Image: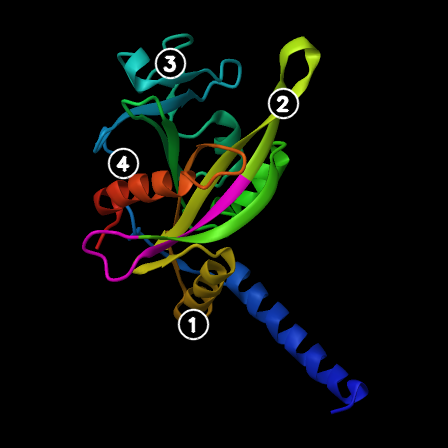
Amino acid sequence: MAPRTLKPFFVVLGLMAATSLALALTVDVNLVDQPGVKVLFPSQLGRWNGDAIVFCQNKDCGAQFYSSEITNAVVCPKCGGKLSGLSKVEADLLPPDTEGIKERYRSPDGHTVMTSIVLSGKERASIHRPETCLRGQGSDITGSQILDVPITGRQGPLKVKVLLLTHERAGPGGTKESYGTYYAYWFAGKGRETPQHWQRMIWMATDRIFHSVAHRWAYIAISGVRTKDGNEYQSEVREVIGLLYPQIVLK
């Protein structure tokens, strides 16, 4: 088929895609309050000890605390403001029906991983591609991969996306030194899981257009430090997610 003949075909495809997207984002939907995960981190994951992170919602304070540092995880000990699992900046940017929590886990050998769950409400803007925020925070994404994580009792491994990041910090004598971290995540809906943002968008659009429903999608992430050129982080990702998954994913 000649290029000139193909042009109308691609125009039609483009219009169909644009129409589908417009319908997905504007059609009136019913929120199905059946998330695929529990928004609750366990205090213990095998050898890992957890410590919840909370943030003051007073814009003039904005303090951050670990639950082990305070006696009341609801009221800010500095200003008396409300404490939440989302920072004030996140809460202001996201739709009001978005939920979120964060937890720090430490192992006896000194390793630390940070975990988070963001649970969407009715609006699509509750969840987005993590790459967007990470680049905005000054991280350089130097690589990515899909990692298979074996889960006890699950049929087949869970696929998670792992981003390899590089950061700079001040070194001795005013020099700068780089160090590496990783950021692993996946999306979970009711009975659906994927490491791909585009796959979630397709499922979400299909539900909105053909069923007029918006399921509550969750975005689960863990992050930690890695050696610059090593792959030891993979075993850490598999261990933590392997322990976490059975405790938060709803059947």
- Marks 3/4: CA–CA distance: 20 Å
Residue occupying image coordinates x 74% and y 85%: 6
- Marks 1/2: CA–CA distance: 52 Å
- On the picture, is 80 further left or further right than 14? left
Q: Answer yes or no: do the residues labelled 4 and 1 have beta carbons within 8 Å?
A: no
Residue farthest toward the left in the current orientation of the protein: 153
Q: Could you say whether the residue bearing mark 1 is in a helix, strand or loop?
A: helix
- Marks 3/1: CA–CA distance: 45 Å
- Marks 4/2: CA–CA distance: 36 Å
Magenta span of residues = 150-164
Q: Is residue 7 magenta?
A: no
Residue occupying image coordinates x 60% and y 29%: 167
Q: Could you say whether the residue bearing mark 3 is in a helix, strand or loop?
A: loop
Provide the residue designation for mark 3. 76
Say which of marks 4 and 2 sits in front: 2
Provide the residue designation for mark 1. 210
Provide the residue designation for mark 2. 177
Amino acid on which disc 4 is placed: Leu
On the image, the x and y values in percent for residue 38 come to 27, 43
Q: State which quarter of the image contains the C terminus.
A: bottom left
Q: Answer yes or no: do the residues labelled 3 and 4 have beta carbons within 8 Å?
A: no
On the image, the x and y values in percent for residue 98 come to 42, 41
Provide the residue designation for mark 4. 40
